[in-house]
Image (cartoon, helix red, strand yellow):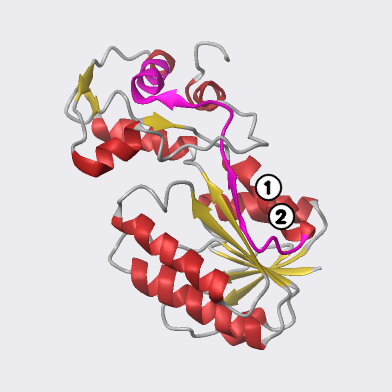
Amino acid sequence: MRVLVTGAGGRLGRAVLARLHEDGVTVRATSRQPRTDSGVEWVVADLATGDGLDEAVSGVDGVLHLASAPQGGRTYQVDVLGTRRLVVAAGAAGVGHLVYISIVGVDRVPIPYYRHKLSAEQVVTAGPVPWSVLRATQFPQFLDDLLTSSSRLGPVIGDRAVLAQPVDPGEVAARLAARLVAGPLGGIEEYGGPQVLRFDEAVRAWREARGSRRPLLPVRIPGRLGRELRAGGLVTEALPRGVRTWADHLADTYGGTGRK
């Protein structure tokens, strides 16, 4: 089986490459700049312009579409129009299965980036290639970075009642690989971490792991955005779930205070 992976250089992409290599899958990966790597065929392709996409999808059986541009003002060009370019090219090449990685809550949480991800889902579902969509919850590294940035001025700033469900990127990579092999779902699957945490619970564990005394400064997020985040817009009850916890991430990153 030959699989094309877009966004292979990102955090999830690197985990996916490792998983596919372990599974014995022949991998082709896209990059906007020339790259070399043992065990991976790197090809130059740009979703924002379409350059190289026809060559990238030629001769592959499936596509794992992970590429995204959440920052820098290129989100619509890459995530929506770029996904459309990829789907058209994959359809013309006779690709048998396209798996798109999305985010739990794109249909609920009113964030501009999420609206683009939802539009990209719609491009995939309306396209000519048999498809699957996997919506994952947030990675623990994202939550870790968020807490670090929100505490730059001293206290950790945030809405204590926001709910999160960190999921390990390696486990998402395994789920993506399994979904690819299982064949087109023609539907949307959700996948989350083992625990749903309130923001204040996540902060408490994070402070303990880092040996920090920074207090939590509660700031209630207003409007519909805050309501959705507090009501569980970023979490899922779907099974199965991952097994690695927020405490596991903290222990691996900071030494932790024991695993829960």
| Image position of 92 (left or right of 234) | right
Mark 2 residue element: helix
Residue 173 percent across, percent down from the top left: 64, 49
Badge 2 is on which residue?
179
Q: Please give the name of the residue rendered at 54% of the width and 50% of the height, measured from the top-left corner.
A: 135
Badge 1 is on which residue?
175
Residue 208 percent across, percent down from the top left: 40, 13
Q: Please give the name of the residue rendered at 69% of the width and 51% of the height, measured from the top-left corner.
A: 18
Question: Is 203 located above or below residue 57 in the figure?
Answer: above
Identify the image quadrant of residue 207. Answer: top left
Disc 2: CA contacts within 10 A as few (<14), some (14-19) or many (>=20): some
Q: Are marks 1 and 2 in contact (CB under 8 Å)?
A: yes
The residue range painted magenta reads 183-206
Q: Please give the name of the residue rendered at 35% of the width and 25% of the height, measured from the top-left corner.
A: 199
Of the pair 201 and 6, the residue shown nearer to us: 201
The reply to whether residue 249 is visible in this rendering is: yes
